[in-house]
Amino acid sequence: MKKIISTALAATLALSSFGAFAQENHITLISEPVADIAVIPEIQSDKLSYNGTVKEIGEDYILFSGETEIRFNTGDSTYICDYDLNPVEKLKEGDTITVVASSAMTRSIPPQSQAHYILVRTDENSPAPIYAQVASNSGTEIMSADGNNRIVFDENTPVTANKIRIALKGQDITVGSDIIAFASVVGMSLPAHVPAEKIAVLNLAPVEEEKEPEHDVEKITFGGITYEIPLDYITSELFGNASERLPLRIVCEAMGYTVTWNGADESITLSKDGKETTLYVGKPMVEGLSEVPVVIDGTTYVSTLIFKVLGGSEADIVEAEQGVIEVR
């Protein structure tokens, strides 16, 4: 993990698809001021949604008619359901559907893609379904990974979950989940303001466990005391050789030293328990050796010889495995 030191949002909302959506799915568009630019975490959505009707049904596919014709391949992994996620045993030609499919599509005529979910509208008065892969969830607002939809909800918004036997609230929906939000009114802003009347969770993504970052150095044992000092080695052409350096102030202050910089002569004084040690930038830390403190972007870097300076020339510096420097 060694670090090397070397010397407005433009987007367009396609309202044409919303127009077809409104005509077909009872959705009303309302004019709103453009929403504040939202910071969307970088999540690459691998699914897209399409609204239209079933034109033809085959053994392992459906021919979909919407803005264009698409052949959606189906299989055991394709879940066909109504807007409440109840299974639908059989599709019929003419059914109004929303297909959530792989974003990968062939260039054939018609193009083909793999269908993950097919939602069938069984109630003519149902609000419109809007697919989103969750990029962030504040507890009252979900941002879609494509940046097109800002889905708002509260603790009373009904949430239906596919294949999950526990009650969910909107704030429980995890990043990366696939959801369908239902709204009768959608704001014509970017991202679109979607006040969800209910939310269906097609797939609840597992919560990623936060991993502790790994560092080149995790602990330093000095004077019989072990200090937790997670940091990384630094390399730079300014060091003049291939050896690595550590930030002096971070290391020494963590071990209880007071570090004082004197700009007049570019010296650093290290004080602890009534004892003082002074180093000079550009001058050898240890007599007879060439390694010197170097300042880069206001930070002083030193080699592990600093422990010989502090612990005496007889100090033995051991770089043990698992990020431990031990000075004996």
Image: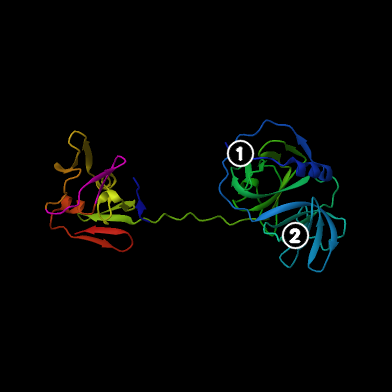
The magenta span reads: 288-302
Q: Is residue 286 left or right of residue 213?
A: left
The foreground one among 190 and 110 is: 110
Residue 314 at x, y = what percent?
13, 58
Q: Is residue 57 magenta?
A: no
- Pick the quarter of the image with the C terminus: bottom left
Picture layout, residue 62 above or below residue 258 = below
Q: Is residue 179 left or right of residue 253?
A: right
Residue located 79% across and 65% down the image: 61
Q: Is residue 229 visible?
A: yes
> What amino acid does circle 1 point to?
Ala
Q: Which residue has dot 1 on it?
A: 10
Check disc 1: other Cα within 10 Å, few if <14, some if 14-19, many if 20+: few
In space, the residues marked 1 and 2 are separated at their CA atoms by: 29 Å
Q: Is residue 272 visible?
A: no
Amino acid type of the residue that numbered disc 2 sits on in the rendered structure: Pro
User: Mark 2 Cα within 10 Å, few/some/many (few <14, many 20+)?
Assistant: few
Q: Which residue is mark 2?
A: 111
